[in-house]
Amino acid sequence: MSQPDYVFTSAEDQLELTRLQAIEREFDPASRRRIFATGLTAGWRCLEVGPGAGSLMRWMGERVGPSGRVVALDLSTKFLTTQCPAHVEIQQGDIRTVSLPQDSFDLVHARYVLIHLPDYEIALSRMLAVLKPGGWIVLEEPDFSASRGIAGTAAQLAAMQHINQAIHRMYESRGMDYALGLKLLPLLQERGLCDLSMENDAPVSVGGSGLAKMMAMSARQLREKYLATGVVSDADLQRYGECAEDPQSRAVYYATVAVAGRKPVE
């Protein structure tokens, strides 16, 4: 089994925390809505895989209350320093190998986790194994094949195209699927889940918006990895950043594909 090669591992801690918090501000409202739609309520046992900076972990803890339990599992827990109530447990480990009781969680949630694993099907199998019969899994993964510049200068749009190509090559070189989100529904269908639903959210972002700024942050942190693909230059990176700040620009940076399904009761 390969070890995770998280593309942001080498990022400076404060920059990475800022990026994770930007993701939470941008995507938590939709994630909370999707999770709440499963029926999340007091007393549930929940597993949050890859909690990032911990906002959803804490929100779930409030929803399930002291009679419930939330386990937040991540390879690194350094950004989960906020004191949590006793029913919220932070655990360091790899979902593919960690020891968790089978058929024990009412809800399993992961956002932007599987895309970083070449053997994501092992991780998914483990998530389903710990899910109770009748329990819900909610997965949210990106589809970078949806990325495209829409409005901007010719140089900005060319830079965006080159960055998108670099993202593709970067993931491909690691044996990862940059359009993994599109596979979520078939993956859960193959495993026999029921009550399946799917959303494909590909917003057109204006320059200066939260998502545009977040992607500019990612490009700065992944600069060396993008340059190593051979399809971008320093000028591309500069223009990509300018595009992300330009209020006249418009772009789809990526789509978020979200799928929810319930484990059958045998």
Image: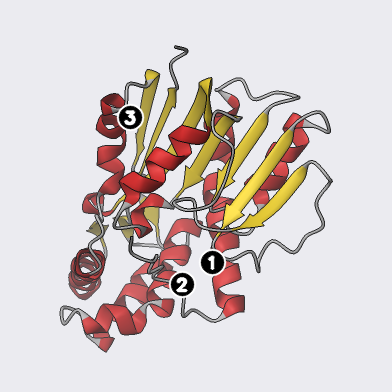
Residue 198 badge: none
Coordinates of residue 92 in the picture (x, y in percent): 61, 60
Tag nearer the camera, 3 or 2? 3
Q: Let me know if residue 83 appears in the view.
A: yes
Q: Secondary structure at mark 3?
A: helix
Image quadrant occupied by the N terminus: bottom left
Q: Image quadrant of residue 36?
A: top right
User: Image point 63% across, 59% down: which residue?
Assistant: 53
Q: Secondary structure at mark 2?
A: helix
Q: Which residue has dot 1 on it?
A: 19
Q: To which quarter of the image does residue 14 belong?
A: bottom right
- Residue corresponding to mark 3: 188
Does the rendering let one see residue 255? Answer: no
Contact between marks 1 and 3 (CB within 8 A): the answer is no
Q: Which residue is mark 2?
A: 217
Q: Is residue 24 above or below residue 161?
A: above
Q: Is residue 184 left or right of residue 265?
A: left
The part of the image, by quadrant, that contains residue 202 is top left
Tag count: 3
Q: Residue at x 34, y 54 (%)?
A: 115
